[in-house]
Image (tube, rainbow, N blue to C red):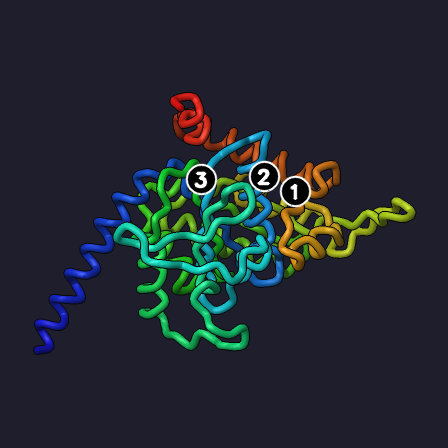
Amino acid sequence: MRDEGTNERRKMIEKQEEQLKRKMAEVKHKIAVISGKGGVGKSLTTVNLAVALASHDHAHSVGILDADIHGPCVPKMLGIRGQQITPDRGGFSLAIGPLGIKVMSMDFLMEKDESPVVWRGPLKMHAIRQFLSESNWGRLDYLLIDLPPGTGDEPLSVLQLLPDMDGVVIVTIPSEVSQIVVKKAITFARMLKIPVIGVIENMSGFVCPKCGTETEIFNVGGGEKVARDLDVPFLGKIPLDPKICDDSDKGMPFIVNHSDSPAARAFMEIVGRIEEWLTSHRQVVPSIRGSESKSA
């Protein structure tokens, strides 16, 4: 009986891996957003990078996998909490956010806000495998994976499961403590032979909206120093802006609502550098969304 159960589980995993390869073959670029520690604004960065990629200037088809099983917050930031994930064509439908961004998150499966997910590693890995292999992602230009902080189960599972991963983007803040930990994230990616696309320094200075004075709340330059020390690209700095937090709490895309702000311009410039990196490391074909509109 035990052998039969083991064989069934093995067959199920093999089937999911086949589905995963098939579905991920329709995604041109797969990028994981990681950090060495929590509290650096990684999910916020992921959401705004996705909106920047899907915006009018870039017009890419984009998906987000919220792989933070215990603390998913991408749906809240995109204003799509409460959408239903339902069976669809042999898999699961996906929630649709602003600008057509497709989203899969544990948050959609929770009945109450206060309900915790009390799972050990194997259950979390199984859930992530299901999210990737059984969700109907369709054809995407970009799939961004928002990973929880650290180098444990979820980051390890995603980076080992995903075929043809383009690379990781690492988010940090300028503090010295964050610099120490982000080096571990870079080394982690290199151990798994995943390219490091670059480092983003979040919360890099604050400009007072009333007097224009700039204050270095967490210092400045820590992310750039780490990138230089470990010989990886530095993608840019994102300044603190209270409107980012306000819009995230309201579920509104900051990039769209405040496109003329320094933080929004920083996100757009960082997206441009990511695209330049991808161009130099892999041949980039035209946007799926653009090619579909032309063929139509």
SS assignment at label 1: helix
Outermost residue, top direction?
Answer: 294
Mark nearer the N terminus (1 vs 2)? 2
Q: Give the residue number, with chain letter if any, for mark 1.
A: 255
Q: Residues within 10 Å of mark 1 (few under 14, many from 20)?
A: many
Which kind of residue does numbered mark 1 sit on? Ile
Q: Please state the horizontal and vertical placement of residue 216, each as a whole percent of the image.
A: 79, 52
Secondary structure under badge 3? strand
Q: Where is mark 2, residue-wise?
A: 52
Q: Is residue 171 left or right of residue 32?
A: right
**Quick one: quadrant of the C terminus?**
top left
Q: CA distance from mark 1 to mark 3?
A: 18 Å
Mark-to-mark CA distance, 3 and 2: 12 Å
Above or below, comparing residue 78 to residue 229 in the picture: below
Residue at (88% x, 44% y) in the render: 212
Where residue 241 sits in the image (x, y, percent)?
75, 50
Q: Which residue is mark 3?
A: 142
Q: Identify residue type, mark 3.
A: Tyr
Check if mark 1's residue and mark 2's residue have beta carbons within 8 Å: yes
The answer to whether residue 75 is left or right of residue 246 is left
Mark 1 / mark 3, whichever is N-terminal: 3
